Amino acid sequence: MIAGAQFEIDTDPASVQLIAPLETLERFEGVSFSSTGDVLAVATSENNTVLLFRRKLDGRFEEQPYCTIGGANSRLAYPHDISFSTCGKLLAVAQRRGAIAIYQKSREGEGYGPEPVFEISGHKSKLALSDGVAFVPPHDRYVAACNLQLGTIAFYRRISSNPLRFKTRPEFELRHPSLQEPDGLAFSSDGKWLATANHGNHSVCVFQRQNRFLSAGRLRYWREPVSVIKDPQMRYPHSVAFAPRSNHLVVTNAGANYFSAYQPSTRQSRTRWSEPAVLQQMVNNEAAFMEVNCRNKMEGGPKGIAVHDRTLAVCSPEFGIKIYSFRDRPGGVADAG
């Protein structure tokens, strides 16, 4: 067990599950848990698929996917990130080509697809290298995407549930000088906090949602971040996730062989996240990491990360998916306003 301030990862080899890629082209980039935690999805960019794994009765996940979305003849093009909706019926897939594909759960079973029921794309969408995607909790009325090329976070409003339709033009775009090539994003479970992993300046930004009365009922986040984490140990941060009980931020580094956890604290009604990290967890064999990282300083480390209850999953093109158990305790974060 490795412990940081109020954040502990169980590193016992017997308790850490590894799901290895089945094919050489399965470049695991993004990972997500369903709202119940019973399904784990991973985006495999090079072969244009999304794989879904079921949780078994013993708490571990099956090592073979029960559902595969996409493939050689599908419309998916370099899927880089994925997000389940809170209701569990929708799955959004960010494609680097500049599109968000949204799949709906099958009525006949637990799978999704085979084709998206809606896609956000085209010139009006203002998507450019859309590397990250997430439904905005708690009501899934918006889906958000980060644009690495433009340095923006775009929000698209759902305008119909049956048939499913979203606006294809962003209703709101979040911009700030600290958003440098955002590669991943995540929301706290109540939607109050938005975190971005900034590949371009080795930082993480946290933005706060505006009170609905101040925003006239519209979804808006303050353009000035409440916290900017500039930990010198960050190396091309790729993805972020909030621990649901404590709002610890867990961050992967594509250019380093570890993920890190940052603790929130509130002083004088202002919430910030710790710097440096309260925990740093190595994820791969150092020699295997160095073999890749020596060729490209932006590669070799963990990519996607997801958290559900007390389960944490991290994925990488080099090792596949590692699934850990963790414990966290709240650190005095102010309640949502």
Image: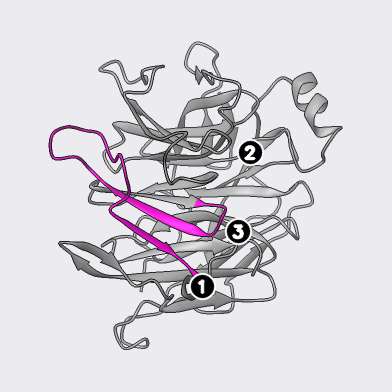
The reply to whether residue 187 is visible in this rendering is no
Residue corresponding to mark 1: 123
Instruction: Tell me if 158 is positioned left or right of 196 in this view.
Output: left
Instruction: Decide if residue 260 is in sight here.
Output: yes
Instruction: Give the camera-side residue of 169 and 3.
Output: 169
Disc with the residue nearer the chain's start (2 vs 1): 1
Check disc 3 and give the amino acid type. Answer: Leu
- Extreme-right residue of the structure: 294
Viewed as shown, does residue 293 lie left or right of 52?
A: right
Q: Is residue 229 magenta?
A: no
What segment is highlighted magenta in the picture?
95-123
Q: Amino acid at mark 2?
A: Phe
At numbered mark 3, what does the secondary structure look like: helix, strand or loop? Answer: loop
Q: Nearer the viewer, residue 256 or 262?
A: 256
> Which mark is in front, 3 or 1?
1
Which label number is shown at residue 129?
A: 3
Residue sitting at 50 percent across and 76 percent down? 173
Q: Can you give x and y, in whole percent of width and height, for residue 56 in the image? A: 29, 19
